[in-house]
Amino acid sequence: MLIDVTDSTIVASRALLGIVARSMSPALEEVTVPQFRVLVVLSNKGGMRMGDLAEQIGVHPSTLTRTVERLEQNGFILRSPVPGNRREIRVSLEERGAALVETVTQARRATILSIIETLPAEEQETVKQGMTLFARAAGEPDPADLLELGI
Amino acid sequence: MLIDVTDSTIVASRALLGIVARSMSPALEEVTVPQFRVLVVLSNKGGMRMGDLAEQIGVHPSTLTRTVERLEQNGFILRSPVPGNRREIRVSLEERGAALVETVTQARRATILSIIETLPAEEQETVKQGMTLFARAAGEPDPADLLELGI
DNA sequence: TCAAAAGGTTGCAATCGTACAATCTGTGAG
DNA sequence: CTCACAGATTGTACGATTGCAACCTTTTGA
């Protein structure tokens, strides 16, 4: 029985992964995965200093400088001086960057919604309860893990 | 209500994605993501010709040649001539490659199992039903989508 | 038999990500 | 004021992915 639940969950996870990957795929024609990670972090946590961003993402500051450079050149983000401190640089999302993340998020939601819509109401309720229980038991995922995939 | 189910599912998907990413992360210290994709395909579909493998993965044959070269040098896969045809080359998993994929799969199962174990039996049942319903409604994910993430 | 097609590999070039070391500018403590 | 430290960028180097074009060998069809 325990095996049953695990198997069901693994199968469902494959379906969800497919959805996530597909939702991201258009974005990956505009930016690379590491670049998208930057956008996602900025979207979740808001603008921040270069150093903090590098730490969040887990790359060397010099690496981030180059990545951010490319993102800025393509209009996804903005680098601006911090008032009152001329050493630090603040990075934040430009409209284009925010829109890209938003597009992916919306696509994901829309896909899931369209799948759930195909179920009768009482089955929707079951899905909701099952997902909620699992999510609660699993706890919040480590953000660093999610970043690995650029979520 | 529809929104509720969608939200629950999205939250659960984040948890599942964290699990998937974390399970993959040790493997990514041994191979790159594109390399891992090759291993996964070979694990799922068995050995095949270079050309077919390139098509499965969606890269140019010449790209695959180089990737496979590296995997072979590190003992993850094997390139062997096809008997009866001296043009084609068959690629298949070496023990080391199979073990790597297996490790990731097992880690994923173990994590999910450990989470589900924390639930009382009747909640496990609910999770099972919910996951099963969702998975069925979602259908099989397009393998090409999954590959995007190296699953 | 011979030319065309199939299957793979090599040469070449561009792009990224990555880190380390060195550097430059600013800040802050003494 | 000066010196150590903080924050970020530049110089440098390397490895990986990627595709295109050219090429070699083998197969196959006319």
Image (tube, coloured by chain):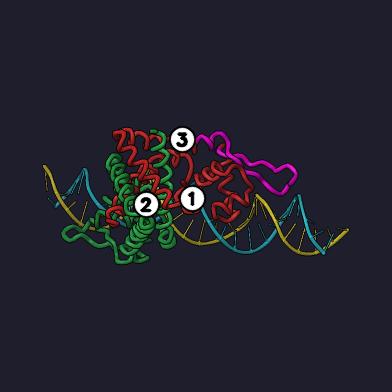
Chain colours: A green, B red, C yellow, D cyan
Please tell me if label 1 and label 3 are on a single chain. yes
Q: Residues within 10 Å of mark 1 (few under 14, many from 20)?
A: many
Can residue B63 be found in the magenta stretch? no
Instruction: Give the Cα separation between the discs numbered 2 and 3.
Output: 22 Å
Q: Position of residue A57 (x, y in %)?
A: 32, 49
Residue A55 image offset from top left, x and y in percent: 29, 47
Residue indicated by mark 1 = B147
Quadrant in which the N terminus of chain B is drawn: bottom left
Q: Is the magenta stretch mostly helix, strand or loop?
A: strand
User: Disc 3 on helix, strand or loop?
Assistant: helix
Q: Is residue A104 above or below residue B42?
A: below
Q: Do labels 2 and 1 share a chain?
A: no
Which residue carries the number 3 mark?
Answer: B103
Mark linked to residue A150:
2
Of B40 and A49, the residue lying toward us = B40
Q: How far apart are labels 1 and 3 at the CA level?
A: 18 Å
User: In this orientation, does residue A36 appear?
Assistant: no
Indicate whether residue B88 is drawn in magenta.
yes
Name the foreground residue: A133 vs B70.
Answer: A133
Magenta residues, as a range?
B76-99
Of mark 1 and mark 3, the one earlier in the sequence is 3
Q: Label 1 sits on what residue type?
A: Leu
- Which is more toward the observer, A140 or B76? A140
